[in-house]
């Protein structure tokens, strides 16, 4: 029986393991936290990702390794790759960990991106602001996610505050200044590439964020065919350039008919959770198929789907379960501000049916604001 090792024991590892059960797979998780939520279902090795003893034990017990979040040290993935198969490869992980390397790759591949500049000093920041203009966003190059490690510069008077907030990290994780994009829509491509180079995507997804954290995803996004083809072509170029194996997400801004790449996530992605109920093969099972060298499953969508993210604490599950098209996912985490603790997916055959269900659940949970933009899109 094949054992898949997962670096990271969060909800993505948990859902990977659950999706792999029908394939007869076993799993082992390496995480630095003893109560990581995947450990409720999967055996764990508890240790630091840079601890070679922990890595050696992990490697000795698995046939192939992957990861469930992009902040696993790339050098640890490389150490493992010298001993066992690791997918995606360490280079893809390293590029996605560094916003400067990532944006530079996009530009090299001809994928439009906002203007950006490497920032090492306050003088660099002043020069970049003068060149790129305002508004802009100062970000850490590494370790930023869900809106963390960012400072929005709205006026010249904000430059000093931005440097005071993030400048101390210039010499450690690095900084990048990016032009602010007043986008009309946020989209994502969830794609999978197999060991043999086969490439597939699920329908384009539209996303809404609150305070930098994904609040809702709708699939399929209603976009023009030319934009869909462009988005898929961008994702394919990234996958082929990195010799990528597995599932990844390419996040895009749509502004005045132009797609601009925001970032990529080298893993299964929050905006693809709807695929569990809404597609022939979920992103989780297709990721496992890819890293194991198995045939990829169909990414065909079944009807229409919306995912609502639960942040901080879970709401009452009953309104979701009362909905005929509602599906509940509890990650087994304790409540904490800003923490992803679960999600719900709603899948229906028509846009009208899905909108009706979302409106009903929104009222029952007092989350009308969360569902309103999705309902508006469905009824447009």
Image (spheres, grey):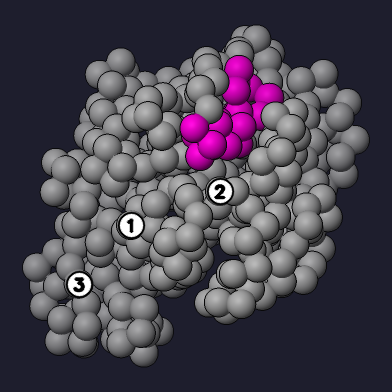
In the rendered structure, does residue 281 fall within the stretch colored magenta?
A: yes
State whether the magenta stretch is mostly helix, strand or loop: helix
**Extreme residue toward the top, this view:** 349
Q: Is residue 346 left or right of residue 207?
A: right
User: Which SS class for mark 1?
Assistant: helix
Q: Name the residue under label 2.
A: 64
User: On the picture, is 352 further left or further right than 376?
Assistant: right
- The residue lying at 78 percent from left, 57 percent from top is 43
Residue at numbered disc 3: 118
Q: Is residue 372 visible?
A: no
Q: Which of 121 and 45 is in front in this view?
A: 45
Closer to the chain start, of discs 3 and 1, is 1
SS class, disc 3: strand
Quadrant of the image occupied by residue 326:
top right
Depth check: give the residue in front, 277 or 167: 277
Which of the two labelled residues, at mark 1 and mark 2, occupies the earlier sequence position? 2
Q: Residue at x 28, y 56 (%)?
A: 102
Residue 379 is situated, as x and y percent measured from the top left of the image, at 55, 18
Which image quarter is the N terminus in?
A: top right
User: What residue is shown at x 76% (from left), y 20% (from top)?
Assistant: 325
Q: What stretch is highlighted in magenta?
A: 274-293
Report the disc number at residue 91: 1
Residue 21: in sight, yes or no? yes
Give the foreground label among 1 and 2.
2
Residue 238 x %, y %: 28, 41
Element under label 2?
strand
Give coordinates of residue 34: x percent, y percent. 77, 71
Question: Label 3 to label 1, Cα distance in Å?
Answer: 20 Å
Q: Identify which residue is drawn at 36% across, 78% down.
A: 173
Q: In this view, does 88 lie above or below 323?
A: below
Magenta stretch encompasses residue 290: yes
């Amino acid at each position: 029986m094949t054992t898949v090792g997962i670096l990271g024991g969060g909800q993505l590892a948990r859902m990977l393991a659950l999706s792999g059960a029908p394939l007869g797979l076993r799993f082992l998780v390496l995480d630095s936290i003893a109560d990581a939520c995947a450990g409720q279902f999967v055996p764990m090795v508890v240790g630091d990702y840079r601890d070679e003893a922990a890595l050696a034990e992990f490697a000795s017990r698995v046939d192939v390794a992957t990861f469930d979040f992009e902040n696993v040290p790339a050098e640890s993935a490389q150490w493992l790759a010298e001993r066992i198969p690791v997918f995606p490869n360490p280079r893809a992980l390293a590029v996605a960990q560094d916003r400067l390397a990532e944006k530079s790759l996009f530009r090299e591949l001809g994928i439009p991106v906002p203007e950006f500049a490497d920032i090492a000093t306050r003088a660099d920041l002043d020069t970049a602001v003068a060149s790129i203009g305002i508004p802009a966003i100062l970000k850490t190059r590494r370790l930023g996610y869900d809106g963390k490690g960012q400072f929005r510069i709205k006026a010249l008077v904000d430059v000093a505050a931005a440097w005071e907030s993030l400048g101390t990290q210039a010499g450690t994780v690095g900084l990048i200044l990016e032009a602010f994009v007043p986008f009309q829509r946020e989209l994502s491509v969830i794609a999978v590439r197999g060991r043999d180079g086969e490439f597939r995507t699920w329908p384009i997804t539209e996303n809404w964020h609150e305070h930098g954290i994904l609040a809702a995803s709708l699939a399929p996004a209603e976009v023009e065919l030319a934009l869909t083809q462009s988005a898929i072509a961008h994702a394919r170029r990234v996958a082929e350039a990195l010799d990528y194996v597995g599932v990844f997400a390419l996040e895009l801004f749509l502004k005045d008919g132009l797609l601009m790449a925001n970032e990529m996530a080298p893993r299964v992605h929050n905006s693809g959770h709807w695929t569990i109920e809404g597609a022939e093969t979920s992103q989780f099972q297709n990721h496992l198929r890819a890293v194991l060298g198995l045939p990829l499953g169909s990414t065909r969508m079944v009807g229409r789907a919306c995912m609502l993210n639960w942040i901080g604490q879970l709401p009452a599950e009953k309104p979701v379960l009362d909905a005929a098209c509602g599906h509940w996912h509890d990650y087994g985490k304790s409540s904490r501000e800003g923490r992803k603790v679960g999600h719900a997916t709603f899948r229906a055959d028509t846009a009208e049916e899905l909108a009706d269900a979302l409106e009903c659940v929104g009222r029952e949970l007092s989350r009308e604001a969360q569902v309103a933009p999705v309902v508006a899109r469905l009824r447009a």
